[in-house]
Image: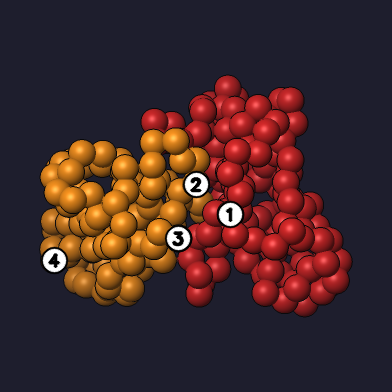
Chain colours: A red, B orange
Amino acid sequence: KAGVTQTPRYLIKTRGQQVTLSCSPISGHRSVSWYQQTPGQGLQFLFEYFSETQRNKGNFPGRFSGRQFSNSRSEMNVSTLELGDSALYLCASSLEGGINSPLHFGNGTRLTVT
Amino acid sequence: TQLLEQSPQFLSIQEGENLTVYCNSSSVFSSLQWYRQEPGEGPVLLVTVVTGGEVKKLKRLTFQFGDARKDSSLHITAAQPGDTGLYLCAGYSGAGSYQLTFGKGTKLSVIP
C-alpha cells in the first residue's frame, strides 16, 4: 500500500511569490491535514479537510489556503511568500480524521524562501 | 490555545542506558499520541493513550498517560542507536477535534 506522497520534495522561492504544494493521501483515506514544521515552533496545525470540506483551521494568516479534491488529493497554497514561511510542510492522511483515526504523514516539502 | 511542553529538549546518552521523556500540559487532553521522526522523513505514530493512568508497552518503550490526562511520559530501556530521532507528543483536545497539537519534541541521540 503506497504511503502519503508529497510533491515537490524541495522548493526554493523568492519573497513575494506564491507556491502550491501537493499531497496524495493513502488510498481510501478521506481526511487530509497540513502542518508547518520549523525549528523554533515545532509542528503547527494549518488545516484539515474531509470530503472536500475544511473542518478545522489553525492560527495562520489568510495567505495560507488549501483545498481538497473529490479524489481526496489536497493542495495548499501560500501567497505573497515571506522569509518566515521557510519550513517543512507536512501532510498527513487518515481514514476519517480525529481521535480514532491514526495519522500517516508524508515526508514533507521543504520550502525555502529567499 | 492548548500547549504541550516536552522535556528535555535534547538528550544524548550511551547505548544501553535508560531514559525518560516528559510531555506536560495545564489542559486536559482526550488522548495523547507519541511519534518518532527521523531526519528527512515525516513523523511516525508509535502509540496512542486514551485512558487516564494507562500504560502501554512497545518492546523496550513504555508509555504512560497521567491520571488527570494532562501529562504523559515515554521511557526507553536499554537504548540503542536505532532509537535516535525526534520524539514528539501530540494531543487532541476533545472527541470532536480534528486539530492535533504537538509538543516541540525531544531530540534523542544514542551513542554506540
Other residues around mark 4 within 10 Å, as few (<14) / some (14–19) / many (≥20): few
Relative depth, front residue between B78 and B46: B46
Instruction: Look at the numbered discs 1 and 2 and tell me whether their residues touch, using CB distance below 8 Å.
Output: yes
Above or below residue A77? Residue A75 is: above
Q: Earlier in the sequence, mark 3 or mark 2?
A: 3
Q: Looking at the picture, how far across and down is residue A27, in whole percent? A: 60, 25
Q: Looking at the picture, how far across and down is residue B40, in whole percent? A: 53, 58
Q: Earlier in the sequence, mark 4 or mark 3?
A: 3
- Asked if one can make out residue B87 in the rendered structure from this viewpoint, the answer is no
Q: Which mark is residue A58?
A: 1
Tell me the amino acid under the disc marked 1: Gly
Chain of the residue under label 3: B
Relative placement, left or right, of B32 versus A2 is left
Q: Which mark is residue B17?
A: 4
Q: Which residue is mark 3?
A: B1
Give the mark toward the camera: 1 or 3.
Answer: 3
Q: CA distance from mark 4 to mark 1?
A: 39 Å
Q: Which mark is residue B99?
A: 2
Q: Secondary structure at mark 1?
A: loop
Give the mark toward the camera: 4 or 1.
Answer: 1
Tell me the amino acid under the disc marked 2: Gln
Above or below residue B26? Residue A66 is: above
Chain of the residue under label 2: B
- Asked if one can make out residue B21 in the rendered structure from this viewpoint, the answer is yes
Q: How many callouts does the rendering have?
A: 4
Q: Secondary structure at mark 4?
A: loop
Give the mark toward the camera: 3 or 2.
Answer: 3
Q: Earlier in the sequence, mark 4 or mark 2?
A: 4
Q: Residue at x 43, y 31 (%)?
A: A101
